[in-house]
Amino acid sequence: MNVLVTGGAGFLGMALCRALQARGYRVVSTQRRHSKVLEAMGVEQRLGDLAYRPHVLDACTGMDAVFHNAAKAGHWGDEQSYVDANITGTLNVLEACHEYRIARLVYTSTPSVAHSGRVPCEGGNEENTPYALSFKAPYPRTKQVAERAVLASNGPSLSTVALRPRLIWGPGDTNLLPRLVERARAGRLRFIAGGVNRMDTTYVDNAADAHLLAFDALAPGSACAGKAYFISNGEPQPVKEIINGMLVAAGEPRVEASLPFGAAYAIGALCEGLWHTLPLKGEPPMTRFVAEQLATPHWYDISASQRDFGYVPKVSVAEGLKRLGAWWGAR
């Protein structure tokens, strides 16, 4: 089995590469820059930009299946850069799959495609949680367009499925936890509205396992073909407990400071205006999208993924935090 992982040098991408290699598959990764970690793992790397069609065709040459995990994430940035990475890149991958008669495509989406501002989602599933109709950031908009394209491409010659893992974390994370620790140490970390709203999270190995299980079940006419699924640990917790659990695992004290939602939303709007007008470098410390995400209940029913392809989270949040702490201390 020859499998391409787009974005294999990223957090989830690397977990997918390891899991696929453990099955004895030949794994190829495509991303922009060379990864010494993937090199040490023996993963072939085909470097390039997914928005460049000839590169995607080259990357997909000889592949039997594709895990399309690469994306431009975040809550700020040039609109066109999100379109190039998330929409054009996905369309190129789909075209390459058809060109080379690749039979299976597992797409990494996000619950943000259904994020509707301050509308809470508590126990929502794929059927009763519609796509969002408006967006305050280019990431969820472009990911929704890409997910729709992936699912619309499902058919007799190419079976597709989209997974929406919520807030992936765990050992190997070089983004979320380091930023939380940095902000906490600088005294710049605040919860919004007390951080009491519950949210889902997904331990990284559980997210990878969900992808492989969906891949195994995927075939023309299968239960999961052409569908999207929310993925998580199935243990929704208050945002405050999620963040503090990670901080404590990293040996840091708990954070208690909080901002009212109205203040955080106003700060986000002000920051967006300043970053657009001046413009300032880097990401603004707050945006309206982030304020809504951190203050609104978002947790999902994952029973459909268990029913259709047998996904059951193997690593609990408590066990995951133990592993996170061990990894952080041994870095």
Image (tube, grey):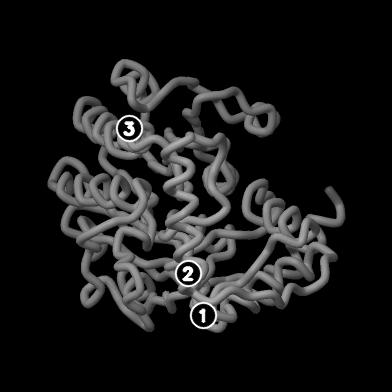
Q: Which mark is residue 286?
A: none
Mark 3 or mark 2: whose residue is earlier in sequence: 3
Q: Nearer the viewer, mark 2 or mark 1?
A: 1
Name the secondary structure under disc 2. loop
Residue hosting label 2: 232
Q: Is residue 54 left or right of residue 275?
A: left
- Write the residue at 26% across / 40% down: 103
Residue 331, image x and y in percent?
A: 83, 48
Q: Which mark is residue 80?
A: 3
Mark 2: amino acid: Ser
Q: Which mark is residue 236?
A: 1
Q: Is residue 126 left or right of residue 216?
A: left
User: Does 216 sit above or below residue 322?
Assistant: above
Q: Quadrant of residue 121?
A: bottom left
- Write the residue at 53% across / 66% down: 202
Q: Nearer the viewer, mark 1 or mark 3?
A: 3
Q: Is 70 in front, or is 254?
A: 254
Give the total number of marks visible in the rendering. Answer: 3
Instruction: Sort mark 2 into few (<14), some (14-19) or many (20+) by Cα contacts within 10 Å.
Output: many
Q: Are marks 2 and 1 in contact (CB under 8 Å)?
A: yes
Name the secondary structure under disc 3. helix
